[in-house]
Image (spheres, coloured by chain):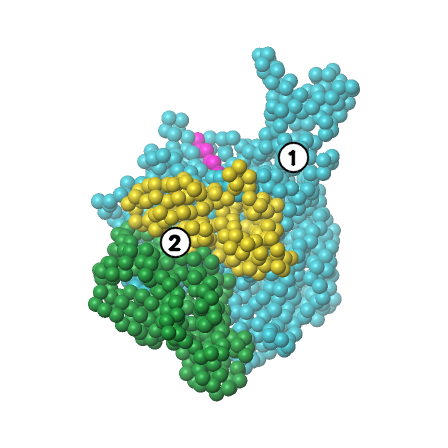
Chain colours: A green, B yellow, C cyan
Amino acid sequence: MKPAPFRYAAPDSLTAALELVADEDARPLAGGQSLVPLLNFRLARPGLLVDLNPVTELVGIEVREGTLCLGAMTRQAALLRSDVVAAGWPLLRDAVRHVGHAAIRNRGTVGGSVAHADPAAELPVALTALDARFRIRSVHGERVLSSDQLFCGALTTALQTGELLVEIEVPPVPAGARMAFAEHSRTHGDFASAGVAVVHAPGERAAVALLGAGPVPVRVPAAERALLGGAPAAEVAGLAAAGVEHDHRRAVIRTLIVRALERIQ
Amino acid sequence: MKISVTINGTVYEDEVEARTLLSDFIRHQAGLTGTHVGCEHGVCGACTVQLDGEPIRSCLMLAVQAHGRSLRTVEGLAGSDGALSPLQRAFTEQHALQCGFCTAGFLMAAEALLRARGGAVSEAEVREALAGNLCRCTGYEGIVAAVLSVAEAPLDAG
Amino acid sequence: MSGSGLIGAPLTRREDDRILRGETRYLDDITPSGALHAAFVRSPHAHAAITAVRVPADAAGVVAVLTAADLPAVAARYPVMEPRDSEVRAGEAHPVLAEGEVRYAGQPVAIVLAPSRALAEDGVELVDVEYEVREPVLAVRDSDLVMMGWSARRGDVAAAFAAAAHVVSGSYALPRLIAAPMEARGAIAEHDAAADVLTVWCSAQDTHRPLAQLAHILARPEHSVRVIVPDVGGAFGSKGVVAPEVAAVAAAALALGVPVKWTEDRLENLVGAYQGRGIEGDLELALDPEGRMLGLRARLWADLGGYLLTTTTVPPHTAGTLITGCYDIPAAEVQVRGVRTHRVPTGPYRGAGRPDAAYMIESLVDAAARATGIDRVTLRRRNLIRRFPYRTATGLEYDSGDFERCLDLALGLTGAPAGPRADTAGPAAGAVRGRGVAVFIERAGGAWETAEIALTPGGRFRVSSSSSPHGQGHDITFAQIAADRLRVPVDAVALRFGDSALTPAGVGTFGSRSVAQGGSAVALAADELVARARERVASLTGCDPAAVGHGAEGFSAGERTLSWAALAETVAEAAGAGGDPEPLEATARFQSANVFSSGAYVANVSIDGATGELSVERLAAVDDAGTVINPLLVHGQVLGGAVQALGECLTEEAIYDDAGQLRTGSFLDYSLLTAAEIPPIITGEVQTPSPLNPLGAKGAGEAGAVGTLAAVANAVTDALGGRVVAPPFTAEKLWRALGEGPAGSPPGPPVETTALPHTPSAATARRVRVLVRRGAPALALGLALGALAARGRR
């Protein structure tokens, strides 16, 4: 389990990184907690690995005009420890707690988890529930995508060759909003087979996003309307899970929604 | 390419390929074989070392990425006088190891946890923090007991 | 017997110190200079003929690519064990490298040698093997190729069933499991051409079996092979047979004249190391109106995989012989068919047939309790064996035991009985609870081991044992035994293990036998040394040997006292004076029939009614391992075995697809339990000494793995109202079983479909892990998908 040979570059600026990833054969390396296993299994075989770790301008957690701005190379451990995140977007803290283990979170990045788009990953689902927007840059310019524009399928995003996810913007949530993340996995820190992210600001806003209901994070507007309308948890859960094809997963998601809603009542 | 990595206070300089894993550099180039490799895909935690004081999987980092950085491995846990640390001693007293292959990873994860928490950890926190390390021999009970036995103020010991 | 209180003392281990400092030497920590590193070309198919192997003329960095035809040193396939009274097709023995066909995905086809492992892996990708793919046989009952058959019969079974008031039947199945020691396998081979000695450093359970296997395969006299077992990072049965890759490494070292090293990686270990369990059975039990067992019929089918490795035949035979469990059953008819499938071979994994037998008979006894309406504990008490020695219908002789005491103690450790009931209060609304009881017996010990002991200067002792450790703690345990006999401090005794050139011959470390056999050999050698020392003292003092006393101070003869150190000095003085030094040494070989450990386990479980998720809430484990030398280490063995079995109950299963490809080829898929999933385990002990060895010892290495599975399985069945589900007890399986209601009742409403769904979303969700788990074939298959997978990875 040794990687196939590759060339390696460690740019120290975003500009330099963007030039390097414009190469058709290049792959960016963020925290490496998903890519390096694939390299070791020789399932990923980039010609050029562009290490984003020295690009310090991609690291940071800050609030700009009420919006939480997460640099793509922000470590998951930093997200977990952030007071700003805990105060305003606790859903992210609750979700990232489920990502792997401490040693994984110390290297794994927020942007890496998003760009990797594993259907079993927690952060994309939490960010989807929070209406996050994803800032993408290339040498040709910049575009900003919503969650449903970014996630195209399992391990597949709208990112084109030469594009890097540089920042994730999470809009403010109404004061008094409550939020919860719940998941089902076989062992602690394992990928989730099912999960839910729920945000609720009574009378203002409701979001229900699912993990394991499809290849990408799924929002369920019917459940959100019911939640906003004050429906009981069981009804919201039933609506949220209704579209889940696999019967056992449907039952698990229904249960997780009920549990998540109990936590935020 | 040539890299320079400080491990347990000693500087190691050597040529590596871009694809050389940090775990292989530590073991086969720096010669510090106390760090073990159990899965090379980041699940078992046997290769856990501390990078600037925080636990990481050395099989999921390239050696070139450690250039200029400071690492600590199991060989760096005993005191300068050679005495085992209280955590290491607790591992023996609580029979926290059998074959010993996973032990270095558990020690590096547990030491970082205790240091980060100022020694105050609950059993649930210990179990969660150690869930990233697999042991096939002990059933974990001795390991959890060993870590709790050196915690300053176990919150729910037992 | 013990003047020093060392037997039964919970002493900590001495080998821990260097482990904790990182100063150990496992296989991969050793690299002879000039060594070539090996990687293997493996079959991507479960079943195929090899029509061509093409090696590129110019493979950068590769020193050699060798196939079976290029290894003249390989003279034979694997030696195969034939358990007593069995019929074995030895012609199905595993070849070292594939010989014209492959019978499992992952089978080694060619060895690639290069200056580094990475370059060797590069080389593997350049070798082009042409296959003619054939249909694999995967279901054991579909296979008509029986590689091992065994049967036993005692009493009039037909009459027992004809006379029965109740006949209860059950069908049970255990999946294949992967031993997954944290250190995978590996070896280094180096040939000293001048002396013609092949030295093999091998991550193995002992030196003797690798040595015998390699000598057979390479047709070399045993004295021309030296096996050194360095520190070993766990085995659990999986390192008792050398890997075919190890034999290839040895043959390559002989062919090339340079040292060759192979460190198995995790992918290779999951795909290519022999697996455990993989057995199913149909059982029938005849009982009289009071629930007395009259007769048992059992038919077992074992999935042996594509070939026979040396001990592939052993676990199903062990399961067959132990199928009557702890019960006095006068008539029994047992048949075992070990069949060929197109999967990697099976072999011993912790318990090796014992958990299989306990799971099946204990499940059947619970079924009998439900069918007869007799309380399950009462039913067990009514049928337990109480007279020893006891000869079973399958031909075993149980040496001793007190099954009822174990049962009583275990019941007392689990608190109030909790039958199945719907709990509608609180957050665990809809939880269903169950309790499972199991008694079990396990074959332990047996055959022989050797120990050598020598008095060394300063009154210290060197003990060389044929029994060698891979985590169990032989060092302190054997030191305790020797020191107890010698009446010296435990630190005066140093142990030596694991080098066939330096340590005596024996059988090996497996089957819970080290203390009973190896420890007894140490005890006898120490006794012999004391006897010789007594004679020496007698001759030095002119006193009758019978009058020489032996105690903590050494030896006393009349007024005179001679310490062990003084005796050692007399040896040194004699040597210095040019006389015959007559070192004080002794050797003992100890052999006995099997001893039988036993125990009783009780598990309390709950199943989340909404999701099917199983929680083992409490496990009580009572073991009777005979006389215990070191309770700290026995406790560690029991816990470790129990947690492996909990993994078997909750997550572990080697899953294959319809093409015979392993779907669990990574630790993301083959999921081991972590510290966060372990329930409280309360242990208790009964010590019924074995009459068959001087220590009274039995074995504890497998106990936890034997009792836990049976107890948890019965608890799950109890919670499900009698419905039997095969392990592992995944949330999905239990959720479906809950939806179907209790056994015998019509299906209930919550389940919409019983077909195993495989929705597109589920399929894609698992894609990356499918890639990973495909193992060797993924290297070919995965390229296109791998590129896709890499796209989004940052």
Is residue A8 highlighted in magenta?
no
* Rendered view: C139 above or below A235: above
Q: x and y percent of residue C469 in the render?
A: 55, 41
Residue position for label 1:
C490
- The answer to whether residue C714 shows anywhere in this view is no
Instruction: Determine the image quadrant of residue A92.
Output: bottom left
B104 or C327, which lies in front? B104
State which region is magenta: C224-230
Residue position for label 2:
B60
Q: Residues within 10 Å of mark 1 (few under 14, many from 20)?
A: many
What amino acid is found at the position of numbered circle 2 in the picture? Leu
Instruction: Determine the image quadrant of residue B158.
Output: bottom right
Q: Given the image, what chain letter belongs to the residue carrying mark 1?
A: C
- The answer to whether residue B81 shows anywhere in this view is yes
Q: Give me the residue at 25% from left, 55% from top.
A: A47
Instruction: Determine the image quadrant of residue C521.
Output: top right
Q: x and y percent of residue C358 in the render?
A: 61, 57
Measure the alpha-carbon separation of dots 1 and 2: 44 Å
Q: Give me the residue at 32% from left, 55% from top.
A: A54
* Rendered view: C537 above or below A75: above
Location of the N terminus of chain C (image quadrant): top right
A260 or C192, which lies in front? A260
Q: Given the image, what chain letter belongs to the residue carrying mark 2?
A: B
SS for dot 2: helix
Is residue C227 highlighted in magenta?
yes
Q: x and y percent of residue A261 in the render?
A: 52, 78
Horizontal side of C375 relative to C133 (left or right) equals right
Q: Total label count?
A: 2
What amino acid is found at the position of numbered circle 1 in the picture? Val
